[in-house]
Amino acid sequence: MLTDHHSHILPGIDDGAKNVEMSLEMIRALKQQGVERIVATPHFYAHREDGIDAYLQKRQHAFDTLMAHSPATENILLGAEVAIERGISELDGIQKLAFEGTNYILLEFPYTSFADWMIEEIENITYNFKLTPIIAHLHRYTDDYSKEQMQSVLSLGALIQFNNEVFETWGGKRFLKSVISSGHEIVFGSDTHNMKTRKPNFDLLLKKAKPEWIKRSDALLDKPKVHI
């Protein structure tokens, strides 16, 4: 089952789909590209939210609004793209931001200089809440992180999520291959936000990726569910 592990299709909750019409257009495009399962991962920035429960209420409202307009829409799982911030691992209930029915949590590094505290936050989330981190679009940081810093991230043993855009550059493909050859588990996602500048792009993945890479990605959510 072709799966999009990273998307911003829920209407009006973040910088993704602005309304239901855009949401449905994005979903239709993904379906036309063969995607059968979508994980909706709206941004979660702790410093902007009024707590996890308030965020979950907003996310549920956005999902319910979408479903009310298209109840036939199926195989959408709820998750979040959680920004790594100082103290994020101390948030009570952070496990509620994991992919629905699993212990996988999508974490995004900040677009700032690398710092050791970021690794510490991920380690604390992993061990204190028994969650399995998925690092969002790590390929975007290859120009900003040194080899040693990137190795610190990879040594976490987290899953690595690649946006399909990685196949657009030679450097991106080289980094992807190096991560795969080192034995890391990977997943793919569109990280789609709209139908213009960041549109669904699984057609690119299907054209450029090796079938075994896609199969490896899609198998993740077929593993036994974990109730948290």
Image (tube, helix red, strand yellow):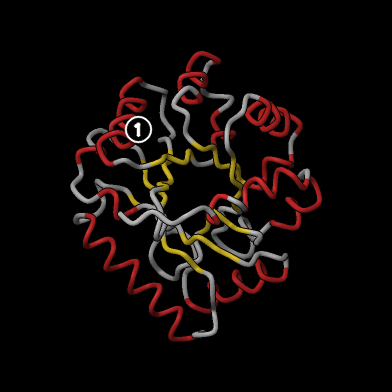
Could you tell me residue 40's position as x and y percent? 47, 61
Could you tell me residue 38's position as x and y percent? 55, 63
Q: Is residue 5 above or below residue 114?
A: below
Of helix, strand and loop, which one carries label 1?
A: helix
The residue lying toward the viewer, choosing from 158 and 46, is: 158
- Left or right, residue 121 beside residue 135: left
Amino acid at the residue labelled 1: Ile
Figure label count: 1
The residue lying toward the viewer, choosing from 120 and 114, is: 120
Asked which quadrant contains residue 143, the reply is top right
Residue under circle 1? 122
Could you tell me residue 192's position as x and y percent? 57, 57
Residue at x-position 73% and y-position 41%: 167
User: Is the N terminus in the top left, top right, bottom left or bottom right quadrant?
Assistant: bottom right
The residue lying toward the viewer, choosing from 162 and 185, is: 185
- Left or right, residue 109 beside residue 188: left
Residue at x-position 48% and y-position 18%: 149
Asked which quadrant contains residue 113, the reply is top left
Going by the picture, which residue comes out furthest to the front? Answer: 224
Q: Is residue 11 above or below residue 132?
A: below
User: Is the C terminus in the top left, top right, bottom left or bottom right quadrant?
Assistant: bottom left
Residue at x-position 45% and y-position 78%: 66
Q: Is residue 214 above or below residue 142?
A: below
Residue at x-position 53% and y-position 24%: 144
Going by the picture, which residue comes out furthest to the top? Answer: 148
Local packing at callout 1 (Cα closer than 10 Å; few below 14, some 14-19, many 20+) is many
